[in-house]
Amino acid sequence: MRKVTIGENILEVQDGTTYQELADRYQADYPHDIVLVLENGKMRELFRKVKKDSTIKFLTTGHIDGYKTYKRSATLLMLKAIYDVAGMEAVCGIKVHFSVSQGFYCTSKHAAVDEAFLAKVQTRMEELVKQELPLEKKTIPVDEAIERFARHGMLDKARLFKFRRSSTVNVYRLDGFEDYYYGYMVPNTKYLKYFQLIPYDEGFVLEFPPAKTPETFAPFAPEHKIFTTLKNSTRWSEVLEVATVGALNEQISNGNIGDIILAQEAIMEKEIGNIAAQIASQHDKKLIMIAGPSSSGKTTFSHRLSIQLLAHGLRPHPIAVDNYFVEREETPKDEDGNYNFECLGAMDIELFNTQMSALLRGEEVSLPTFNFLTGRKEYKGNTLKLGPDDVLVIEGIHCLNDALSYSLPQENKFKIYLSALTQLNIDEHNRIPTTDGRLIRRMVRDARTRGSSAQRTISMWPSVRRGEDENIFPYQNEADVVFNSALIYELCVLKQYAEPLLFGITPEEPEYLEAKRLLKFLNYFQGIDSHMVPNNSILKEFIGGGFFHL
């Protein structure tokens, strides 16, 4: 017998009792389906068995890790249904690209994706759910995995495993169909009740309920500007033949990564130049408003855009909205009593509008500099007066929200949304979340510029994400232009900086699980010498050594 502590309850259970059996006992106490457990601080799948005395905590689909597990498992369910409906060739032509609305955008090379086809697949998925079939996990040698997936026609997976450092691979099997997944899975298909297949663009979306209400669908709400930007970035990754991590690793091993880096940076510079040309062609655009989530590279982008604006005959002047904070004692506080520097109320909106309006009228203005140590604005003789070719390049998290610039004429604004939208996939069916790339960027930058530990960066990340959900993402569709700052090669550079920081997080610390997950993720990538990164690259904002004084 083993003692299992669940909250305030201590149970005696037989050796070999599965965590699914325990979850079934307690499911009625939880608002959402239990899909994972934490056993003595380690994440476990529900098919695992109790082997020792332990303290466990249940994770539901309402928890971020449980929600990801659900979506990952439902992807396997979808591919199994496609296999049953159209065969292995159709499955090999399916690619899971990136997030759209609440789901994953997918395309097919071999099967004609129309409403009739998707209806057949959805019906088959529903049948598989009713059968309550197990998702079986098996560990096999890497060489066997390479041979097996090559035989299946899943060549991206076979290519990925060639660079695997571990000697084994975990394969999931569903009713005779097998695939590889990066992360945990539910124990059987009965958990996968909520999904929709929706035709969209050239493919379809596997749609899920939102994380906050994992049993109730929200309206399908694709953000077309973000989608178009990601689609274009994905097209470029395919042109460069580095759409997946395995392909990228091959380019590194073959000595071709220098050309890939230069091509990626040239593509990005061309896009920045196109934005500058668009601004220059509209003579009334005096306020270039730039916003984006954390670690998008807004500062470097602003510098590079300014250089391109100069090349088009304009005179750009940077304005950091962070210099318009209210005095520290006037800063709103959050529910925990801490200063909330990310809300709009933390900004001196009236001063900002007064000064920007005066500049538009041709008046000379004395601009503030915010002293973050004293919590007060200071005036140090930084004056500005706009001439006919002058434009303001304004950067801040609220720049797309017209409540910040409520008195400024719309015709004078040009809005840019900037984000690191990861276009690289691990393989055909395993996408890389955009948030992972931004978190690793921030971790590396904060350690270099602020002396912050990886533990602190990870601990603050949920708060950062909440601020983005409230203050940035709701306004991204207001942008005139969406710019993707993700570099297809960047994780190969960042890993050498991030890994030592992550190894510094010990098992006793609450951030250890996330650190372990990120280390496993970075292990997929071959490293690249940071000296190969051009000095004007957005990546230099995070690893240091760039041209710009940041």
Image (spheres, rainbow, N blue to C red):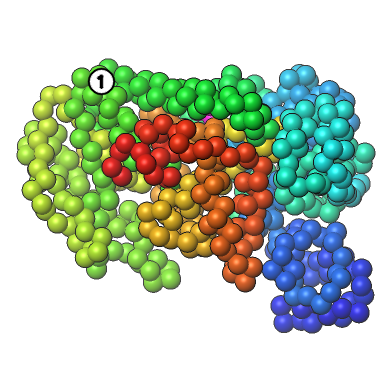
Q: Does the magenta run of residues contain 300? A: no
> In which quadrant of the rendered image does the N terminus lie?
bottom right
Query: From what the image shows, is residue 151 above or below residue 358?
Result: above
Q: Which residue is drawn at 18% across and 27% down?
A: 315
Would you place residue 496 above or below residue 508 in this image? above
Query: For the point 47% across and 33% down, which residue is it?
Result: 532
Give percent across and percent down for residue 58: 73, 66
Quadrant of the rendering where the C terminus is positioned: top left
Query: Residue 448 location in percent, x, y?
Result: 41, 53
Q: Residue at x 61, y 30 (%)?
A: 252
- Dot 1 falls on a residue whose secondary structure is helix
Residue at which label 1 appears = 311
Apparent side of residue 345 relative to residue 90 in the rendered image (left or right): left
Mark 1 surroundings within 10 Å by alpha-carbon count, few (fewer than 14), some (14 through 19), many (20 or more):
some
Residue 316 position within the rendered picture, expressed as x and y whole percent measured from the top left: 21, 31
Report x, y in % for residue 437. Answer: 54, 44
Front residue of 29 and 145:
145
Residue bounds of the magenta highlight: 229-233
Which residue is rendered at x = 54% and y = 32% of the image? 488
What amino acid is at disc 1? Ala
Q: In which quarter of the image is residue 195?
A: top right
Residue 515's quadrant in the figure?
A: bottom right
Residue 232 belongs to the span the image colors magenta: yes
**Secondary structure mainly formed by the magenta segment:** helix
